[in-house]
Image (spheres, coloured by chain):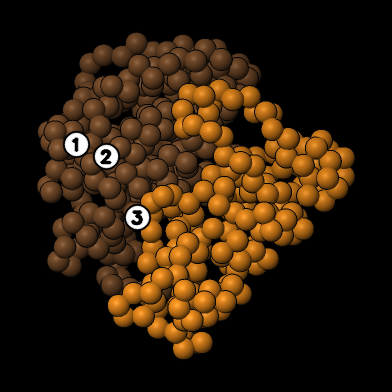
Chain colours: A orange, B brown
Amino acid sequence: MSANVEAAWAALEELTDPEIPVISLRELGILRDVRPAADGLEVVITPTYSGCPAMEQIEDDVRATLKRVGIAARVVTQLAPAWTTDWMTEAGKEKLRAYGIAPPHQTPPGSNVVRFISKPAKAETVPCPHCGSGHTVESSHFGSTACKALYKCLDCQEPFDYFKPY
Amino acid sequence: MSAAIDYLLHLADNALVLGQRNAEWCGHGPILEEDIALSNVSLDLIGQARLLYQLVAALKGGDCTEDKLAYFRDTHEFRNYTLLELPHHGPLSGYAQSSLDYGTTIVRNFLYSALMALLWEALEKSANADLAAIAAKSLKEVRYHLRHSRDWLVRLGDGTDESHARAQASLDHLFAYTQEFWAHSPADAAAIAAGIGVDVTTLRADWDAIVDAALNEATLQRPAVSGYVTEGKQGIHSEHLGFLLAEMQSLARAHPNGVW
Ligand SMILES: [Zn+2]
């Protein structure tokens, strides 16, 4: 690994998700790779949801950060393989929980559509990030952003976001 | 290459037009959670449309951009299913005003999401690697759209007499338009021959299974359909698309090359 690549990873480590400022782009699995290219470095990012408005901000942040530390780099957006919440690091998930967002479960194996929709709605418990209770219910599939569902804790009565498996 | 462009435009226009329709609920949802849900579904659809338009623009080259494709084409150039451009209410002429009906919204989203969940899954094996990548992403999103619309379909159908009657009326109105799903256009045939597209008729048994199971749970009757098959994906649209595009495109056309 060249010194520049290491320096770039170190500089980018401080970049967080524009909407969840406690988790870094690396921990989220958005920042995929930093590699040497003919004209400097190439930083590979993978978009989350197709319509996620944060992606352009993230690209700008990456460019600005590397420019500030004097590293010439190009940002490459890579669609395949598609981003999945399974790439989120364990440390990242813990930070989400501490921030009040229940981290995503592992995505279900296989991709059979019929099985996905016929799965009972309450198959998996989403523990409350505030009190740890498993006594929670989903209020809505869709929360404040596309990546989250809205839940409610029946013990401490607090509403909370659940980062959906994607 | 033309086969790929026509096919990608069809997929993109589907996503954009339904995204624009569903966005009409933004600020008008029947309850706050549904307002947010429909806005999120729209955001996903418009995001899918953007990825597909960017791909088309790259294939066309020259000065083509995603914005030109979305904002500077007219009705006859759009390739979406007619089903997706219809307003959120029963049959009325294009300029008629009526309250938005959530049953219509839910039934349409369910019928379309059931198809796209199967189609995106099959398109993950498209010979066009970029389309396969977009399909993999879109599949993750459409599964949530399908789950959302299916839950509400059951809730409305198996709800009160009023919600049941309105869900059934929406189904009776919209179901005939699903015939267009299964009729190949020349563009479909060319894309299938090139290995880019998928023969949707191979997905029909699975679509029927998803639809019938949900309708059964919702205590709704599947309408028998026959007669005119719409041809929106060949550019022959209902009068409703023009009104939708006029609203969607007016800002970009009033301020060409505007940046904000
Ligand atoms: Zn709690």
Q: Secondary structure at mark 1?
A: loop
Label of residue B126 in the image? 2
Question: Which quarter of the rendered picture does the C terminus of chain B lie within?
Answer: bottom left
Q: Residue at x 53, y 28 (%)?
A: A116
Is B59 above or below relative to A59?
above
Distance from label 1 to label 2 (Cα)? Answer: 6 Å
- Compared with B190, B154 (above or below) is above
Residue placed most toward the observer, A110 or B6: A110
Give residue B237's position: percent from left, percent from top. Answer: 22, 37
Q: Residues within 10 Å of mark 1 (few under 14, many from 20)?
A: some
Q: Identify the residue position indicated by label 3 in the image.
A: B50
**Discs 1 and 2 lie in a common subunit:** yes
Residue A71 visible to an observer of this rendering: yes
Mark nearer the N terminus (1 vs 2): 2
Amino acid under label 2? Ser
Q: Earlier in the sequence, mark 2 or mark 3?
A: 3
Q: Please identify, in this view, whether the residue under mark 2 or under mark 3 is nearer the observer.
A: 2
Q: Are marks 1 and 2 in contact (CB under 8 Å)?
A: yes
Q: In terms of sequence position, does the residue under pointer 3 or pointer 1 come before the other?
A: 3
